[in-house]
Structure formats: C-alpha cells, structure tokens
Image: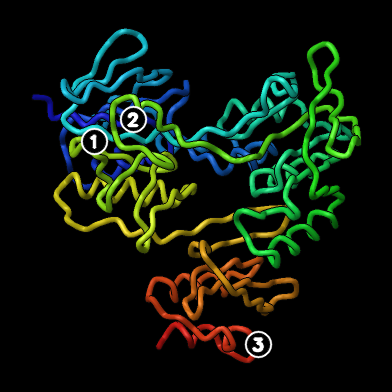
C-alpha cells in the first residue's frame, strides 16, 4: 500500500500542507496537483499590486521552481483529477493515468459565480477575478476613460472598483441589496466604505440589479439595469460570490453540505481523506461554517500537516481577513455571524474607525478601518476569550490595550 500523500489543488491551502509537512521533517512522498500552468502563488496581490503592474508575477510565487525537486515534492501542473477511487485509494487523472495514495488531501478551493449565458455572461469583456489568467485579461483592457460596470457590492467588487479608478476608469457598482457589503458587514462599515468609494468618483447604485448585457460583434457594450436604465460599458467585473469546488468529493461519496464536511482535525467522512481551505465546511463555536479566506486556508493546511505527522491538536479557526482599497486598509478580526449589536469607535488617527460586533455581551468580531491598534487589540481579546463591555468600547477614554491585560 502506498504511503504517498496526494494533494489535489495547488492554491494557498494545498501548498501550505506540502510545505508544512516538509518543515516538520515528514519524508513521505508528496504529489501536489495544480490545474494552472504556473507554480503555486499568492492570490491576494493579483487584484491589487499585480494588476496595477507594481509587482512582478515571480514575486508572487511561494517558492522557486527548484524548491519542489529539492524537497521531494512532485509538482504536477496543468493537471486535472477526474475521479477519486476511495476503495482502491487512487485518483484518476484527465490524461488517463492514476496515482495511488495513502492519504489524500482535497484543497480544490472555490470558483467565482458567473453571469448566465442568457443575459450576456459569455460576451467578451465580462470578467471574474480569481487567478493569474483573470488578472492578465483584465489588465489588458484597463485604460483611462474606459467604462467599467461592477456587478456586486461585496469586497471583490469594491476592490476591483478601487483598482480601476487608479487606471482612471469610469466605474459604476450595482448591488441588488439595499446596501453594499450586505452579507459580510454591518451598515456602519458599509456606509464608511461607500463614502470612500464615492469620494473617489465611483457611482454606487444600490437596490439595482442587472437585467441583461448587450453586445456588438461579441463584445459587451451596454448594460440594462432593473428599472429600465441602460448604461454604456466596455467591460464588466462580476463579484457575486463563489461556490465551493466540492463536486469531485461529492462524486466520490464523501459527505458534502456547504462544501466538503470535515471534523476539527480536517478529516472528511473517509479517514484517509482530508480537506482544507475554501472548499470546506468546518466546525466553529458549535456551528458549521465555510471560511473564504487566505489565512484560514493556510492555517488549516498547516494544522492538517501537523495532524498527519502525529499531532492530536484540533484546528480551532481564528478568523481574520483584510481588504485594501485606495489608501484604506480594512482589517477584520473574528467572525460576525449572529451579531445583534454594533459599537463604532473613533481611532487615534484622523479618519480611522473600528466597528465592534457583539452578540449579547460576547465580542464576535471587529472591522478596523485604518486602525491597526484596534485590530491588534481585537485579535488579542478574541484569542483570549475576553469580552469587553460594549459601553467601554464606545467610550473614547477607554484604553483598548488595557482591556487585553485582564
């Protein structure tokens, strides 16, 4: 029986498993399978510094190509797994070959939702943002004076809008809900971020949906919006969420819900198969959630690697996220699901604020806008399980640092 560890997916989570295994001196053979033609790389800079031409792609690589051979990691690029045979412990590749495994790690990530074909989703000039190819295609058309429609007022859409304005592109963001960031942030955070975008010349249309796109010679030219308004556009960025890439696991008979179901140790319903990253539904504070974040993919990947080398420590997520827009850094500590109260606090610097989420008296999360001090304090409070009184947070005289030393 093979002792090979096969990792399907060479993104943040998949690479983290392989790198951590070698750091822990695990010498079992590793095969890392990636669908793209390039070695594993950081994705967050794609839609920011890479798209702006401020960072070369080589700087995004986790490791140079020779690292894989030197560390005994077989890297298979432009490869696709068609089937997992759990009984035979093999994965069948699209090229007809099979690979035996002793342990399988599924790190297939998530895919951006696309616009349906019948409303113009396949026209040239309609983009999603997920990988290097997406960024390269978008960079080629970002020209001053071009007109961009962003469909979806979440973080992906707003980051695209911010980058486009740096190219002096005219930007309209449409959001079907009554406000931007409806799914992920409180109205207070949404209002601040909305004002920042408007101050940079972005038109934001809330309570507005896309009816269909119109094209000429196969390229998008106009967008018909709900209410009958038509606007001229030369390109469209779609930021309407992602779906977990769990079909391979589902076809293999693994338990799947909102992603591949794993326990606190990253194990699926098959003890020989683990899963990490955006494709996973995992336990968190008595609930089951899916965390779409780079830090979670890395932390969970490293935790699974430790478990594969004998650790008995469960993975306990400490969610954190970030979003860079213009000169604004939004840092998010915690997970705000189920909040029933929000407290807004001014920071020490002009324009800095933090939004604190509570459920009853329990601190759940904090959005820190250009306020690194509040973010750091919030992370410490959440890690220590300290629940500061909401009134104390609201009081500008309260020393946040003192709260962490209780």
State whether residue 212 is above or below residue 62. above
Please state which of the two labelled residues, at mark 2 or mark 1, is closer to the viewer. Answer: 2
Please state which of the two labelled residues, at mark 1 or mark 3, is closer to the viewer. Answer: 1
Residue 210 quadrant: top right
Q: Residue at x 33, y 45 (%)?
A: 301
Q: Nearer the viewer, residue 25 or 148?
A: 148
Mark pair 1, 3: CA separation: 50 Å
Query: Does the CB distance between marks 2 and 1 fall below 8 Å?
Result: yes
Name the residue furthest top: 96
10 Å crowding of disc 2: few (<14), some (14-19), many (20+): many
Residue 274: percent from left, percent from top:
27, 39
Q: Which residue is mark 2?
A: 249
Q: Residue at x 70, y 23 (%)?
A: 121
- For mark 3, give the secondary structure: loop
The answer to whether residue 245 is left or right of residue 316 is right
Residue 276 quadrant: top left
Query: Does the CB distance between marks 1 and 3 fall below 8 Å?
Result: no
Res. 311 mark:
none
Residue 38: percent from left, percent from top:
47, 25
Residue 186 quadrant: bottom right
The quarter of the picture where the C terminus appears is: bottom left
Residue 211: percent from left, percent from top:
79, 31
Q: Residue at x 44, y 23 (%)?
A: 35
10 Å crowding of disc 3: few (<14), some (14-19), many (20+): few
Q: Which residue is mark 3?
A: 396
- Please tell me which of labels 2 and 1 falls first in the chain: 2
Q: Which residue is mark 1?
A: 273
Mark pair 2, 1: CA separation: 10 Å
Please state which of the two labelled residues, at mark 2 or mark 3, is closer to the viewer. Answer: 2
Q: Residue at x 55, y 62 (%)?
A: 332
The answer to whether residue 348 is left or right of residue 63 is right
């Amino acid at each position: 029986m093979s002792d090979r560890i096969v990792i399907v997916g060479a993104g943040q989570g998949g690479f983290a498993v392989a790198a951590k295994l070698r750091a822990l001196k695990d010498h079992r053979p590793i095969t890392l399978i990636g669908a793209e033609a390039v070695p594993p790389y950081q994705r967050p800079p794609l839609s920011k510094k890479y798209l702006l031409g401020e960072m070369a792609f080589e700087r995004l690589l986790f490791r140079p190509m020779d690292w894989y051979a030197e560390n005994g990691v077989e890297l298979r690029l432009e490869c696709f797994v068609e089937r997992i045979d759990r009984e035979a412990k093999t994965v069948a590749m699209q090229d007809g070959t099979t690979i035996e495994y002793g342990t399988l790690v599924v790190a297939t990530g998530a895919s951006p939702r696309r616009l349906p074909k019948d409303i113009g989703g396949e026209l040239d000039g309609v983009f999603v943002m997920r990988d290097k190819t997406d960024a390269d295609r978008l960079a080629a058309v970002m020209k001053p004076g071009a007109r961009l429609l962003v469909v979806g007022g979440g973080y992906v859409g707003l980051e695209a809008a911010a980058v486009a304005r740096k190219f002096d592109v005219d930007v309209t963001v449409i959001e079907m809900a009554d406000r931007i960031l409806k799914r992920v942030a409180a109205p207070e955070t949404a209002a601040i971020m909305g004002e920042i975008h408007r101050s940079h010349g972005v038109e934001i249309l809330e309570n507005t949906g896309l009816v269909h796109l119109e094209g000429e010679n196969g390229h998008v030219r106009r967008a018909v919006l709900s209410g009958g308004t038509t606007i001229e556009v030369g390109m469209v960025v779609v930021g309407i969420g992602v779906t977990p890439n769990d079909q391979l696991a589902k076809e293999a008979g693994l338990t799947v819900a909102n992603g591949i179901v794993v326990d606190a140790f990253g194990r699926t319903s098959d003890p020989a198969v683990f899963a990490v990253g955006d494709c996973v539904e995992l336990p968190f504070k008595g609930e089951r959630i899916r965390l779409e974040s780079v830090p979670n993919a890395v932390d969970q990947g490293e935790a699974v690697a430790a478990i594969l080398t004998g650790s008995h420590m469960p993975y306990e997520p400490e969610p954190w996220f970030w979003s860079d827009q213009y000169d604004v850094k939004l840092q998010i500590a915690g997970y705000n699901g189920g909040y029933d109260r929000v407290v807004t606090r001014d920071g020490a610097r002009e324009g800095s604020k933090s939004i604190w989420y509570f459920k009853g008296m329990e601190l759940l999360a904090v959005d820190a806008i250009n306020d690194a001090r509040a973010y750091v304090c919030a992370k410490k409070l959440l890690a220590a399980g300290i629940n500061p009184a909401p009134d104390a947070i609201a009081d500008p005289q309260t020393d946040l640092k003192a709260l962490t030393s209780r």
